[in-house]
Image (spheres, grey):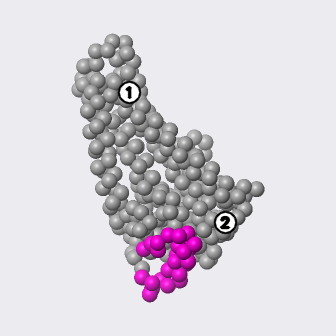
Amino acid sequence: MATLYTHKSRNIRLTWVYLTGFLVFTIGVGWIFAQSLNNPIILYVAVGFAFVMNFISYWWSDKIVLSMSGAKEVSRENAKPIYNLVENLCITAGLPVPKIYVIPDPAPNAFATGRDPEHAVVALTSGIIEKLEKAELEGVIAHELAHIGNRDILLGTVVTVLVGFISLLADWFMRISFFGGSSDNDNGRAGLIFTILALVLSLLAPVVATLMQLAISRKREFLADTSGALITRYPEGLARALEKISSDSNQLRKVNNATAHMYIASPLKGKRRMGFAKFFMTHPPIEERVSRLREMSV
């Protein structure tokens, strides 16, 4: 039986494999576009624009997300049991105590945000507080603390920068090509090959980049499950919590595609995705997460 430590190590390795592949892919796409346009300046502009937009997102996204979700900060006085749970888990995890927000919504769910552990927030719906037993709620909170401790928000920002860079570059290439900007390439057959490659990549690269981003997101969910179970030393608590969240019939009211990936389980209720459609999921299937948790030994 695999231990929590072996599962954690495997997920970390796979994340870095995906991220390295993503970086190589991004550099390759940028180089091909530059060769096709015979003008590397567009690369620098795209990189700068993507980084500026995501720098802003990194510093202020927590406030935006909390506002969009309708979350309200709670104090120790009116949420003492939750504060006690969070504080005890933070001591075990070696993390600062985050701010705690509650979303007035009967659908059980939760997410973490904040640019670093010192400025972190854990948001819980009123439904998850009311419907889960203590051990299950501990599993959920530990999962969110694991996201904070694993710097998943920073990693998500880096990946978003890469996706934004590729999407911008593909869009600008199509616009420049449409207005004749690629006609300056006089490298003969090599120039024609780069132009054809760039045209194909301008269509496919954003899709491939998004698939890579989602693959990394799913691996980080597995890692947070494992890391959270290491904090509580009780994987069954999180497994039961995920089953209850998945089977609950309530639909989270204030949620959209832009924020769905942040929650512990996808809040977008709908048809179960099968086959190739699974690659477009922000989260691994609940059944697979539960199965992995129950296979682990502490």
Residue 150 is tagged as: none
Q: Is residue 29 above or below residue 211?
A: above
Judge by depth and name the residue closer to the eye, 203 or 135.
135
Image: magenta residue range: 75-99
Name the residue carrying label 2. 235
Amino acid type, residue under disc 2 in the picture: Pro
Q: Residue furthest top?
A: 188
Across and down, in percent, residue 20 comes to: 50, 41
Q: Is residue 244 above or below residue 51?
A: below
Instruction: Classify mark 2: residues with Cα within 10 Å, few (<14), some (14-19) or many (20+).
Output: many
Residue 77 located within the stretch drawn in magenta: yes
Give SS at disc 1: helix
Amino acid type, residue under disc 1 in the picture: Ile
Query: Looking at the rendering, in which quadrant would you find the N terminus?
Result: bottom right
Name the residue carrying label 1. 32
Q: Is residue 76 above or below residue 8?
A: below
Query: Looking at the rendering, in which quadrant would you find the C terminus?
Result: bottom right
At a point 46% along the width and 36% down the height, the residue shown is 24
Residue 9 visible: yes
Q: Is residue 295 left or right of residue 122?
A: right
Across and down, in percent, residue 199 comes to: 37, 26
Across and down, in percent, residue 173 comes to: 31, 31
Figure label count? 2
Q: CA distance from mark 1 to mark 2?
A: 46 Å
Q: Earlier in the sequence, mark 1 or mark 2?
A: 1
At a point 40% along the width and 43% down the height, the residue shown is 163
Give SS at disc 2: helix
